[in-house]
Amino acid sequence: MADEIDYGNLMHNAMRSLIQDVLAEVKSNGLPGEHHFFITFDTNHAEVEMAPWLKERYPTEITVVMQHWYDDLEVRDDGFSVTLNFGDTPEHLVIPYEAILTFVDPSVEFGLRFESSEDDDNPEEPAVFSSDEANTAKTEKETGQIVSLDSFRK
């Protein structure tokens, strides 16, 4: 038996389960109203599957948007797969929940951020934040540039 309860890991599991439930609902009924998702994930995760040209362009992480067009959404216990459009090129992605760094639905000011031990002094602490915070959250691109999530909006 462990010496203490691992609340951080339990919260991560609960947050991943929430993402799974949301995606399962979207698979069944589509995206309701103005809902849409910004999903940032670690492209180096061993179970991520993506086109080689995308991996080359985004060697550490990528933020994808599920909004107007997506196809072949499949939701599993360990992750999900979806086909998204990258500059008029449909690409199939396989994304394990463990690879997700942030999940944001700006239409309702909801977001989840998964912290790692490299991010701060409090390892494995998940964070729930509003989309106002998400809108100012930074994403590091392969060039080392810091870009606001607002730049992904139309």
Image (cartoon, helix red, strand yellow):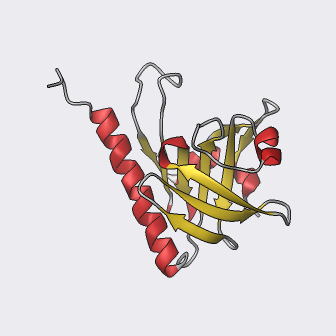
Q: Measured from the top left, where is residue 59 in percent x and y?
A: 74, 35
Rendered position, 38 above or below 145 = below
Q: Quadrant of the C terminus?
A: bottom right
Q: Classify residue 21 as left or right of residue 70.
A: left
User: Can residue 132 be seen at all in this image of the molecule?
Assistant: no
Which sits in the foreground, 64 or 72? Answer: 72
Label count reads 0
Rendered position, 44 above or below 3 = below
Q: Quadrant of residue 24?
A: bottom left
Which sits in the foreground, 42 or 31? Answer: 42
Q: Quadrant of residue 104?
A: bottom right
Q: Determine the residue positioned at 79% across, 33% down.
A: 145
Which sits in the foreground, 104 or 96? Answer: 96
Q: Determine the residue positioned at 44% across, 51% down.
A: 78
Q: Classify residue 149 as left or right of residue 26.
A: right
Rendered position, 116 above or below 139 = above
User: Can residue 6 be seen at all in this image of the molecule?
Assistant: yes
Q: Determine the residue positioned at 49% across, 48% down.
A: 97
Q: Measured from the top left, where is residue 89 in percent x and y?
A: 83, 63
Q: Quadrant of the N terminus?
A: top left
Q: Hey, which residue is sitting farthest left in the picture?
A: 1
Q: Determine the residue positioned at 51% across, 73% down.
A: 27
Q: Measured from the top left, where is residue 101 in percent x and y?
A: 55, 41
Which sits in the foreground, 138 or 142? Answer: 142
